[in-house]
Amino acid sequence: MSFPGEFPPRMWIPGPTYVRPEILAALARPTVGHRTTIMTELVKSIAPRLQRLFRTKQHSLTITASGSAAWEGAVRCGVVKRWACITNGSFSEGWARTGESSGRDTVKIAFEWGEGLDPQRIEEQLRRAGPVEAVGFVSNETSTGAYSDVPAICAAVRRAQPDALLFVDAVSTLAGAPFEFDEWDIDVALASSQKCLALPPGIAVVALSDRFLDKARTVAGRGYYLDFVHLADDWDRLHQTPTTPAVNMFYALDEQLAAMEREGYEARFARHRAMRDRVDAWANGHGFPCFVAEKYRSPTTANRATKGFDIATFLARMIARGHELSNGYGKLKGHAFRIGHFGDHSMAELDHMLAIADEVLHGMGR
Ligand SMILES: Cc1ncc(COP(=O)(O)O)c(C=O)c1O
């Protein structure tokens, strides 16, 4: 395998992100059978920590699949006929497509790419939409860097559709920004391991409300692998998973949840905000404007617009110097670049990377 710079590069892409050596070491522990007491003890250790991460006294669990699978499980278990999906970028559009391709009537409340979600507009449109069984949205559109006011949107949804289930994709914010599953009255929240949890890709974490599971028990055709009723029953009662999970990822998750509690979630969120401010100051100083309006700036993922700037050369020179940043996503490729400043990166490492970026930009005459 050949690689254009130091291998491995330090990953500042918006997922997967840098994984600490201690986590890699946890992954290397001996694989055990998933019906062993070691495994049930591991699930017993993970379960309350996951509840503290989501801030819920209800259900939370892990699935061996990436975050998109949890989108699908939420829709298939929680919606029989009709739901609404709020879109403002590639990932939320992907969730809407998941609903459509699962045969559910999907009402789209569409915002432009780069717009943050406006609670008032959502409330008005949801009132006009007629009854929906659920409403889903993405807290941080990783494709554009738009971070929305999650509690305000949850409240708007509740006012407009008091009986609807509320689904929140927290893929690129959970463990990087405050999240209050119970207080914000959410029914399904989900995140992938490779983002702010700073684990390798491969599992997703999910929180589920009692209300969601009560509804799901009445839904026929939930499928097998992503049947959240089966998953939650086995997790809560047996401390097991219905199918063979990514056993070694459970070691890593347990290790990381413990480490995050040692760091303290408030401190972790403050570190993310500080990294966001540092990247903002650096990018503004170089004349790369934020792609989204100031009030929607993401605490975890920067998306910086460029004009007449050779992003591909910049990224290639950065990776040759040992740091991997990301091009714009989808239709923004070539028009913006992204920095994922989340997970276990430190301010010192961020400063180091930005100093290298300064040199690279200087070399490009910028
Ligand atoms: C906001 C958001 N939702 C969903 C996904 C899909 O997650 P996964 O690739 O883990 O399925 C991503 C991936 O980047 C994302 O950023």
Image: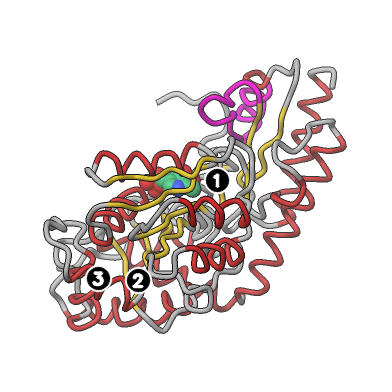
- Per the model, the C-alpha gap separating discs 3 and 2 is 11 Å
Q: Earlier in the sequence, mark 3 or mark 2?
A: 2
* Quadrant of the drawing holding the N terminus: top left
The residue under the point 68% across, 23% down is: 314
Residue receiving disc 2: 208
Q: Which mark is residue 215?
A: 3
- Per the model, the C-alpha gap separating discs 1 and 3 is 28 Å
Is residue 127 toward the left or the right of residue 119 in the image? left
| 313 drawn magenta | no
The residue under the point 25% across, 39% down is: 101
Q: Are marks 2 and 1 in contact (CB under 8 Å)?
A: no
Find residue 133 and report its horizontal and vertical position in percent.
Answer: 33, 60
Q: Earlier in the sequence, mark 2 or mark 1?
A: 1
Query: Element type at marker 2?
Result: strand
Find residue 221 and report its horizontal and vertical position in percent.
Answer: 12, 56
Residue found at the far right of this picture:
285
Q: Is residue 238 above or below residue 294?
A: below
Query: Element type at marker 1?
Result: strand
Residue receiving disc 1: 141
